[in-house]
Every structure is written in C-alpha cells, then in structure tokens.
C-alpha cells in the first residue's frame, strides 16, 4: 500500500509540474500576456463606448476639467490675496465668457462689414477661374461647369439638404445644452476642485492614496501647461498671420486670424489647414500672387513658432514623439471628430505623464523606465 501511495504522489507531483510548466515556459508567458492585452483592450473599448454614448455629459465634464486646469493658477493667485473662493471663481469664469463673447462679436462684425465685398471678389475670382479652365490642355466645356453649378444648387434645395439642416439644428441644441453643463461643471471644478478630488480618493489608503494624489497633480499640471502653452503659441500664430493678411489686403483678415488661433489647438495639421483656407480666400479675392504671398507668410510664422517658441513653452509639457501625436490625432478624429482631434493629444500627454510618476515623484512605472546599457546586456 505504501508503494502505491508513493507512486500516486509521484504521479500527482508530475502532473502538477506539467500543468505549471504549461504557463511557465516561453509560450505560456506569451499566452498570459496575450490574455492580459485582450482584457485591457476590452476594458478600453468599453470605456470609449460609454464615453461616446454619454458624450453629451462626458465631453462637457472633460472640457471643464481641461479649462479648470488651465485657469487654476489664476484662481489660486486670487485666493492667496484673500479674495473669497466664490468671488475668485466668478471673476475667472466671467472673464473667460466675456473674452469668448467679444471674440464672437468681432467675428460677426467683420463678416457683416466685408461679406459683400468678399462675395463680389468671389464672383470675379470664379469667373477668372472659369476662364482659366478653358485654357487647360484637356477640354472642359462651359456646359459641364454649368452642370456642376446646377447640381450644387439642386442639392441645396433638395430634401436631403433640408434633413441635414434639421440635423444641424438638433446639433445646435445639443451644443447649447453641453455648453451650459460645461459652464456649471467648470464653476464647481474651479471652486471645489481639490475637495472633489479628495472625496474621490477616500477609498484609497497608504501607497495607493499617494499614487492617486500624484496622478491627480500630474493630470492637472499637464493639462494646464498644455492649454496655456498652446494658447500662447496659437495667439502668436494668429497675430502674425492676421497682421500679414491685413498688410496684403485679404478680406476677412480678423475672422481668418481667429480660425488660425482655434486650429492651432490641433497639432501638426491645424496650422496647415488654416493656411490653406487663408490662401484660398486670397486666391479668390485678390489673385494667385497674393495667395502665394499668404502661403509664404503662413510658412514663415509656423517655422518661427515651431523652431523657437513651441520648444520653450511646450517642451516640458508635451514630451511626445511626433508619430505618437499623429496616431493620437487620427484616433481622436475618427472617434470624436474635430473635438476628438483637439483633446486627443493632451489626453495622451496625461497618460504619458501618469506613467512617469507611477512609482514616485520621479520614478516611472517599471515597463516605461529607460534601461541602461548594462541592464540591456
């Protein structure tokens, strides 16, 4: 009996060793990592799905967090000078609303004053373009151009365009709702942001609490630095290009400068898109020579900003490779359109910043830690 028991024990030990070795060898490690990656992807897809499904709520809250992070130094400065918390919050909030309202009024005023001249210039430019098309090596008849124009008019007057207009009206209503929600959430973030974060950290203790505090501080620092730095760079771009457009005599120079400012918040492609738009307006209104001058102005301003100003203002905040920024922009645009393109890069910067303080103030997570040569060997 003792012999049989010894044999059974050996067989069980062998089976346990075989089962253990199935996950301990290289293939087992690969399978484990694959299961972990699949689990992470499922959770990430679930979070993105919930975010997009509740975008009317999640997007205003996220934008409020970004704006609050950018405005936090001003609120803190006012509080240090014994301004009551509610009053400091209201001062910052109304200052932002007044600035945005003033910019919107300036755009409307400029468009109203120059719209008629732009329409006349556009008509003249279209006629010149039509005459130029007739000189091309391949044949494009006037009837074909007229057919294209009639097709555009038919589309504008069709029921499909009308349904699109109704969808646009619905989008305007959703935008107004989201804007009001964002303003309310922004007020509370500015007023009680640290207290709200402390409330959310109540379940954590010890090292987990310290890590959560580091993550919160890093998130606010990264978002605030990104928005303030990008706004400064965008303002320089808008002023430089706007002054250049005004000197050249391009119509709607002020609205185009505002568009330059807004598109500068989309890295890599925003400035290019704004430059193309400005060049098209110059081409239609003034001619090809002025359009080439506008392109030269846009390239010059972007080069000065990219080589001198942006590294100083954004070097410590946006420590991301250009390829990572491009992938983040593409993914953000696919998932959230223009707004997704704007917020994708700062969110990616936040994720990277969190990995850099995961184990301590200056201690990145193990898998993101830069390896020394002797460690690689």
Image (cartoon, rainbow, N blue to C red):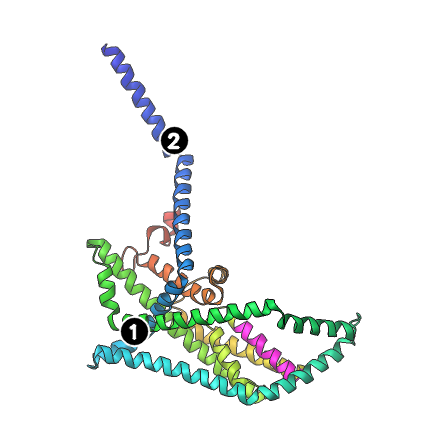
In this view of the protein, can residue 269 be seen by the observer? no
Q: Callout 1: 10 Å neighbours few (<14), some, many (20+)?
A: some
Instruction: Determine the image quadrant of residue 15.
Output: top left
Q: Earlier in the sequence, mark 1 or mark 2?
A: 2
Question: Is the Cβ of the residue at disc 1 closer than 8 Å to that at disc 2?
Answer: no
- Asked whether, in this view, residue 289 is left or right of residue 178, the answer is right
In this view of the protein, can residue 184 be seen by the observer? yes
Picture residue at 49% right of the left edge, 71% below the top: 169
Front: mark 1 or 2 = 1
Instruction: Determine the image quadrant of residue 226.
Output: bottom left
Q: Callout 2: 10 Å neighbours few (<14), some, many (20+)?
A: some
Of the pair 70 and 195, the residue shown nearer to us: 195
Picture residue at 39% right of the left edge, 70% below the top: 177
Q: Position of residue 221 (x, y in %)?
A: 32, 68
Q: Please determine whether, in this image, residue 147 is positioned above or below residue 283.
A: above
Picture residue at 47% right of the left edge, 62% below the top: 336
Q: Position of residue 349 (x, y in %)?
A: 39, 63
Q: Helix, strand, or loop for circle 2?
A: helix
View extreme (front): residue: 159
Q: Which residues are magenta?
A: 271-287
* Residue that numbered label 2 is attached to: 22
Q: Position of residue 212 (x, y in %)?
A: 26, 58
| Magenta highlight: main SS | helix
Q: Please determine whether, in this image, residue 99 is positioned above or below residue 373.
A: below
* Residue that numbered label 1 is attached to: 187
């Amino acid at each position: 009996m003792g012999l049989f028991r010894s044999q059974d024990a050996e067989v069980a030990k062998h089976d346990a060793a075989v089962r253990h070795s199935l996950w301990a060898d290289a293939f087992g490690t690969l399978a484990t990592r694959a299961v972990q990656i699949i689990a992470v992807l499922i959770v990430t897809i679930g979070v993105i799905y919930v975010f997009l499904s509740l975008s009317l709520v999640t997007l205003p809250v996220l934008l409020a967090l970004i704006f609050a992070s950018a405005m936090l130094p001003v609120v803190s400065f006012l509080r240090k000078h014994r301004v009551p918390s509610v009053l400091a919050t209201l001062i910052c909030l109304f200052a932002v609303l007044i600035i945005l309202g003033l910019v919107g009024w300036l755009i409307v005023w400029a468009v109203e004053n120059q719209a008629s001249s732009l329409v006349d210039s556009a008509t003249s430019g279209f006629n010149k373009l039509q005459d130029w098309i007739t000189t091309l090596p391949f044949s494009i008849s006037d009837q074909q151009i007229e057919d294209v124009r009639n097709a555009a008019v038919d589309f504008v007057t069709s029921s499909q365009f009308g349904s699109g207009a109704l969808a646009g009206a619905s989008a305007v209503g959703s935008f107004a709702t989201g804007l009001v929600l964002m303003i309310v959430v922004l007020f509370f973030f500015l007023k009680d942001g640290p207290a709200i974060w402390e409330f959310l950290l109540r379940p954590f203790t010890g090292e987990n609490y310290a890590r959560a505090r580091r993550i919160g501080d890093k998130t606010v620092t990264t978002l605030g630095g990104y928005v303030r730095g990008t706004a400064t760079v965008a303002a320089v771009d808008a002023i430089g290009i706007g002054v250049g457009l005004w000197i050249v005599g391009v119509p709607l120079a002020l609205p185009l400068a505002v568009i330059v400012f807004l598109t500068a918040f989309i890295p890599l492609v925003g400035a290019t898109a704004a430059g193309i738009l400005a060049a098209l307006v110059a081409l239609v209104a003034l001619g090809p020579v002025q359009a080439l001058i506008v392109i030269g102005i846009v390239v010059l301003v972007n080069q000065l900003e990219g080589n001198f100003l942006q590294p100083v203002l954004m070097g410590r905040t946006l420590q991301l490779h250009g390829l990572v920024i491009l992938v983040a922009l593409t993914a953000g645009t696919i998932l959230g359109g223009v707004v997704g393109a704007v917020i994708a890069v700062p969110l990616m910067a936040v994720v990277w910043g969190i990995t850099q303080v995961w184990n301590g103030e200056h201690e990145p997570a193990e898998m993101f830690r830069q390896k020394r040569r002797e460690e690689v060997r």
